[in-house]
Image (cartoon, grey):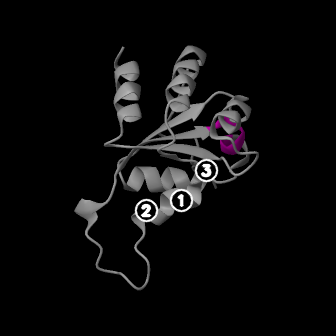
Amino acid sequence: MNRAVESYFFDCKPIKKEQTDKILNILKDSNSYLTHDNELLRIYEPPLYNLYIDRNSMRRVSYVFVFQDNVEHCFIFRSVREFALRNNIELYKFPKGTSKDIRKICNKKTNVNIIATFEDDPITVEIKKMFRL
């Protein structure tokens, strides 16, 4: 019996090294991004005491960047990938070894497993311009 194997790299676009350097420079100038998958999921999931949340007033995430190390080990990637597909969020994959640089920029020693940028944020506009070039 043959089974279809679902690829965990589905809809996860790789980022080139020169693009990674530009994104890191953009992230240095701001701190309005999410760095953990739980923060990302909390934005879209209403708390139990407030089930009638106005989805139009929420901040929308436009890009989610994951790290190569997390994708290879399926650490958090499966839930983030499904979340991104369900909410029409673009998903990109940083090259291997980028997580150390990101931790320095965020001033965190641990707990940085994604970078998520908001739709209405100036850094997202700069990233969109960079991807259009």
Label 1 environment density (alpha carbons within 10 Å; few <14, some 14–19, many ≥20): few
The mark that comes first in sequence, 3 or 2, is 2
Q: Quadrant of residue 87?
A: bottom left
Task: Kindly report the distance in space between the C-alpha atoms of the residues bearing marks 3 and 2.
Answer: 18 Å
Depth order, front residue of 1/6 = 6
Residue type at numbered disc 2: Ile
Which quadrant of the structure image shows residue 126? top left
Q: How many marks?
A: 3
Determine the secondary structure under disc 1.
Answer: helix
Please report the bounds of the magenta region as a residue range.
67-71
Residue identifier under label 3: 77
Is label 3 or label 2 in front?
A: 2
Quickly name the residue at label 2: 43
At 41% from the left and 50% from the top, the residue drawn is 85
Mark 2 Cα shell of 10 Å, populated few (<14), some (14-19), many (≥20): few
Task: Look at mark 1 in the image and give the residue it sits on.
Answer: 39
* Kind of element beneath mark 3: helix
When the figure is inspected, residue 59 is found, relative to residue 64, above or below; the finding is: below
Residue 107 position, x and y percent, is 68, 41
Residue 11 on image: x %, y %: 47, 39
Helix, strand or loop status at disc 2:
helix
Residue type at the position of mark 3: Phe
- Tell me, yes or no, whether the two marked residues, 1 and 2, touch with CB atoms within 8 Å: yes
- Is residue 89 at least partly visible in the picture? yes
